[in-house]
Image (spheres, rainbow, N blue to C red):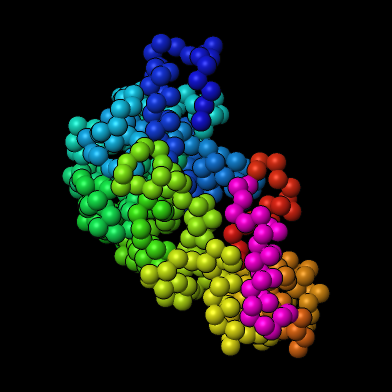
Amino acid sequence: MFDFVRPPWYTESMIAQETLRILTESAKYDVSCSSSGSGRRNEGGIGNGMPDGCCHSFTPDGRCVSLLKILMSNDCVFDCKYCMSRRSVDVPRASATPEEICELTVDFYKRNYIEGLFLSSAVHISPDHTMEQLVRTVKLLRTRYCFHGYVHLKGIPKADPLLVSEAARYADRMSYNMELPSEKSLKLLAPQKDKESLLLPMRQLRRERDVFRAEKRKGAFLPAGQTTQMIVGASPEHDGQILRLTESLYRVTGLKRVYYSSYTPVVEDALLPAVQSAALREHRLYQADWLLRFYGFDVEELVPEEEDLPLDVDPKCAWALRNLHLFPVEVNRAPLEMLLRVPGIGGRSAQKILSARRYTALTFEHLKKMRVVLKRARHFITANGKFYGEKNTLAVRGLLAAGEREDAGARQLSLFDTPAALSAHTGEL
């Protein structure tokens, strides 16, 4: 994340370079660190928890922002098979004090390296000891250092509920990572964890946040909510099971996001796959997650429990191909709920269609100007009675799959992408 050649401004009172290298390297596999959603106000200190900032990503106004992503310690008493910090692996160990983390965060902020902090830790000594250190760090950051920037704190399973509550009074967001989608896989690959040790603090935080808001207390209590992460491919569960857990977590714990991370073999173990999980599978899960949260789909519509999402077409196209009897729909009459289910029509395009058709009968030329993705949508719509798509299911699937290959599938955005390239990768399906 950072260049560890000693810079001229470095002083001996700061965290040791080798410790910093170990702790930031160990933190890179946790992807549940979006900084979006916080409205924490600056009341006389430094920093600003922006509501639209996102770690290593582009904000709506074009900014690319970053968090200091670091572990407090990688010296773990747990032995999760997939983790590079697990007890039984021979790797360099390091720990930082709360004061060192605070000074590093403030110094990097002042130098404009970061806009916030993502702080996690291995379970050092015990869950309660580790959580106490994390809470002390974020409390010092807010009170002694007057830092009002974004702070995401990774919760420690099996820690005292009082520590969990106190952490939520100072952090913008917290996350308890499920990691594996089933109790069976947790027992096999993360024997010190169990499903309840992760779900209990999630439920606790939701209850306390709801009470805090209902009573309209002063201050903030976890203003950016909670997230979690699941590793994809380390265990044999299918996408259907992963998405059913996702849907349940959104409903029961009120999570802001579920993050999916393709399994990477960072340590060797007979119980783990020897190769990395396909990035495209992770991408399909994110697309399905988007449909669950914003497009009104139920998981039962997307994939059976014991199956994976298809890789050749996205989940929305796959659903439409299974339900061709519902199509084509006339864009001048279809309700919003149905427009959102048309491949190639996203949320913004659907709203534009609803607004424009009040004044004129829309044609394919109108839809093209609205930036509807017609190479997908044309097979599922009519515009003013005209249809320009294919009717054969196999032909439609072939064209949709070919279109995905032309778009290069799941591609990481570059800082130097053109505006046209950026608009083609907004997440709309």
Of 300 and 119, the residue lying toward us: 300
Horizontal side of 135 relative to 426 (left or right) equals left
Horizontal side of 332 relative to 146 (left or right) equals right
- Please state the horizontal and vertical placement of residue 406, each as a whole percent of the image: 70, 59
User: In the figure, residue 167 lies in which quadrant?
Assistant: top left
Query: Can residue 103 be seen at all in this image of the molecule?
Result: no
- Please state the horizontal and vertical placement of residue 345, each as a whole percent of the image: 65, 71
Horizontal side of 164 relative to 319 (left or right) equals left
Q: Residue at x 54, y 80 (%)?
A: 322
Of 199 and 21, the residue lying toward us: 21
In the image, farthest residue toward the right: 365
- Please state the horizontal and vertical placement of residue 285, each as a whole percent of the image: 48, 60
Residue 392 included in the magenta stretch of the image: yes
Q: Residue at x 45, y 46 (%)?
A: 275
Q: Which residues, given as a range, are shown in magenta?
A: 389-413
Residue 195 included in the magenta stretch of the image: no
User: In the figure, residue 270 lies in which quadrant?
Assistant: top left
| Quadrant including the C terminus | bottom right
**What number of labels is visible?**
0
